[in-house]
Image (cartoon, grey):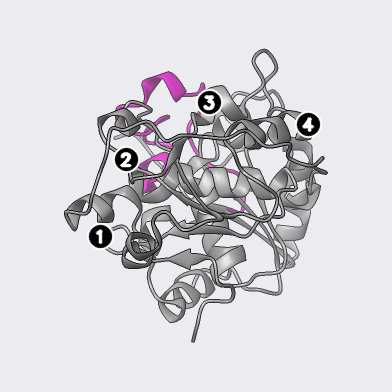
Amino acid sequence: MDYAKDVLVNTEWVAEHLGQPGLRLIEVDEDILLYDTGHVPGAVKVDWQQDFWHPVERDFIGPDEVAALLGRLGIGPDDQIVLYGDKSNWWAAYAYWFMSYSGVKNPLKLMNGGRQKWVAEGRELTTDETPVQATEYPALTRDDSLRAYRDEVKAHLESVKAGQGALVDVRSPDEFSGKVTHMANYPQEGVLRGGHIPGARSIPWAKATNEDGTFKSADELSALYGGEGVTPDKDVIAYCRIAERSSHSWFVLRELLGYPKVRNYDGSWTEWGNAVGMPIEKSYQEA
């Protein structure tokens, strides 16, 4: 079984195509300082927080601002965009989802294995600044079918109960059970209540990857999600804490496996776990 879409390139392909006209590499890391310590030659940097998030509202920048960002990065509407980053491509997948949601029509791909694999293979890094010639990127229109809001998730619970929908919680088992309210070393993203959204299946994002950060085979991924009842016939919503890990799982389900309806709930547990009137389930019991 092959992947549903041609959305991955390997590190060897990137190395062979460095400097090719029309190829635009973008590095998106959780640790925004990594890029400056050395990046793939020709790559530009995106700061997911500063560049994607609205400066005041808890929301994203609009399509006009996204077009302006791409123009500043020197990207034209026909360029091939290859995204990569740290954390097994968490944030590169987040950028892929955000760009898709924002209506970007460029061919988008992830470098399989991300920065981790590129560095492990001893491939070239540079601290040289990548020269950019600004472009006039055309107007964009959001694809709202790729994003789920809190009230939509609440309404979705009935679909889950009826077996027509699915919820995928991609956090760690301890977060899912309610034993902890945040991921290790991320206390600033904790919430008032631990647990998970009722009816969600626990499928941690990392189960979709190999040790080198690459994605598992299509057969393995199909068995992973199908074994939890998350099948292509269902309306699927994925979530985590702030949507970076769930973007990774969204990418697996929609782009690699070809599920026709997969949304990312970017409010995720930091919103749901703090929201008044939202139901939760908690399986952890203190001794």
Judging by the rendered image, the residue that carries numbered circle 4 is 64
Label placed on residue 261: none
Disc 3 from disc 4: Cα separation: 17 Å
Residue at 73% in and 36% down: 136
Judging by the rendered image, the residue that carries numbered circle 3 is 49
Label placed on residue 39: 2
Sooner in the amino-acid sequence: mark 1 or mark 2: 2
Judging by the rendered image, the residue that carries numbered circle 1 is 212
The magenta stretch is: 172-201
Sooner in the amino-acid sequence: mark 2 or mark 3: 2
Sooner in the amino-acid sequence: mark 2 or mark 4: 2
Residue at 32% in and 60% down: 15
Label the magenta part by its dominant secondary structure.
loop
Hey, what amino acid is under mark 4?
Asp
Hey, what amino acid is under mark 3?
Gln
Sooner in the amino-acid sequence: mark 3 or mark 4: 3
